Image (cartoon, helix red, strand yellow):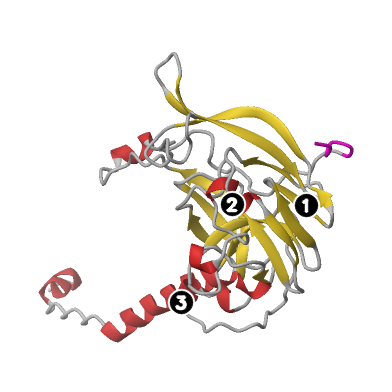
């Protein structure tokens, strides 16, 4: 009998049973690694509201870095840690940073822009920020047109009279914008098309280790100007409640996608992928307004 015949006639060994404990351990380690990365390095974020238009739109997916301002209770994914005031390797945001913050009364992630730092005096008069006694420049820019879609409906209730239809038949929201420039030169567009209560706020001083946050869509943002019972941030935000900095948009969906994967590509908004969310700096002498 040849060696090949012996191998063929040899009894087939039974397969070893799956080690369930080992498999579960591997899955648990993988999950912990993902959670650690999301808690310490970066995590994805979805824009659910219009409060940061035009910089951010409902349907944008972006990356938030977790380390620029240090780590605190808010850094952990799903906010599983109890609240405490200590920070590890804490740092202060810069004017114009877009940050993730948590209100004092609930564990929800808000995304807003830093407009005042610790020790600053800030007021709002007719929609314009007064920072340390000086108006923050706001220059009128040409209106921008955002396509109307399920994620940006441009309703008459929110944007009265701003919905337009172009000769091509395409529906757009024609939004008046202002270019706001903060003391460090950080510049960005804001929308302020209505007169409403939050357009005026008496001067306050931002406490140590706090920042004052506002949405770019000033008429549709519950931010540091709004009380917590209005679902706002209730004033300046402690830095331990700031969980990271928005870095860039990965992709954006217009809301027309369904469970059919073929619709995912059709619903991608053009020109928004890989857009940086760090504000550009105005050229010297270009901040008047």
Point out residue 264 in the picture as x, y percentages from the top left corner: 35, 41
Query: Which is more N-terminal, label 3 or label 1?
Result: 3
The image quadrant of residue 211 is bottom right
In front: label 1 or label 3? 1
Left of 2 or right of it: where is 152? right
Query: Disc 2 on helix, strand or loop?
Result: helix
Of the numbered discs in the image, which one, if any, rests on residue 83? none
- In-front residue for pair 18/67: 67
Q: Which residue is mark 2?
A: 197
**Residue density around tag 1, few if under 14, some if 14–19, many if 20 or more, within 10 Å:** some
In the figure, 104 relative to 152: above or below? below
Q: Which residue is mark 1?
A: 130
> Would you say the magenta stretch is mainly helix, strand or loop?
loop
Query: Which segment is the magenta one?
Result: 284-289
Residue 15 lies in the magenta stretch = no
Residues at discs 1 and 2 in contact (Cβ within 8 Å): no
- In-front residue for pair 102/175: 175
Q: Quadrant of the C terminus?
A: top right
The answer to whether residue 217 is seen in the rendering is: no
Q: Quadrant of the N terminus?
A: bottom left
Point out residue 47 in the picture as x, y percentages from the top left corner: 48, 52
Residue at 75%, 72% (x, y): give it: 207
The answer to whether residue 193 is seen in the rendering is: yes
In the figure, 90 relative to 154: above or below? below
Residues at discs 2 and 3 in contact (Cβ within 8 Å): no
Left of 23 or right of it: where is 65? right
Of the numbered discs in the image, which one, if any, rests on residue 32? 3
Residue at 42%, 42% (x, y): give it: 253
């Amino acid at each position: 009998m040849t060696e090949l015949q012996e191998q063929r006639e040899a009894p087939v060994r039974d397969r070893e049973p799956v080690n369930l404990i080992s498999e579960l351990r591997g899955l648990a380690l993988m999950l912990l690694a993902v959670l650690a990365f999301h808690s310490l390095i970066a995590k994805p974020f979805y824009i659910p509201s219009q409060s940061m238009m035009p910089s951010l739109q409902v349907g944008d997916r972006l990356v938030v870095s977790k380390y620029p301002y240090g780590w605190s209770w808010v850094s952990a994914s799903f906010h599983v840690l109890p609240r405490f005031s200590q920070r590890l390797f804490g740092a202060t945001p810069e004017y114009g940073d877009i940050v993730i913050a948590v209100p004092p009364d609930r564990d929800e992630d808000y995304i807003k822009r830093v407009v005042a730092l610790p020790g600053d005096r800030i007021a709002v008069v007719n929609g314009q920020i007064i920072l340390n006694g000086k108006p923050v420049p706001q220059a009128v820019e040409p209106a921008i047109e955002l396509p109307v879609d399920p994620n940006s409906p441009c309703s008459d209730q929110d944007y009265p009279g701003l919905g337009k239809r172009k000769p091509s038949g395409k529906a757009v929201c024609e939004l008046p914008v202002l270019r706001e420039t903060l003391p460090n030169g950080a510049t960005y567009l804001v929308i302020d098309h209505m007169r409403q209560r939050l357009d005026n706020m008496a001067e306050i001083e931002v406490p140590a280790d706090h920042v004052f946050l506002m949405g770019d869509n000033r008429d549709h943002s519950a931010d540091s100007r709004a009380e917590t019972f209005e679902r706002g941030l209730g004033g300046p935000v402690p830095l331990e409640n700031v969980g990271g900095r928005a870095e860039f948009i990965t992709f954006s969906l217009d809301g027309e996608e369904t469970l059919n994967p073929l619709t995912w590509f059709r619903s991608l908004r053009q020109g928004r992928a890989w857009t940086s969310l760090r504000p550009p700096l105005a050229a010297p002498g270009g901040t008047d307004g």
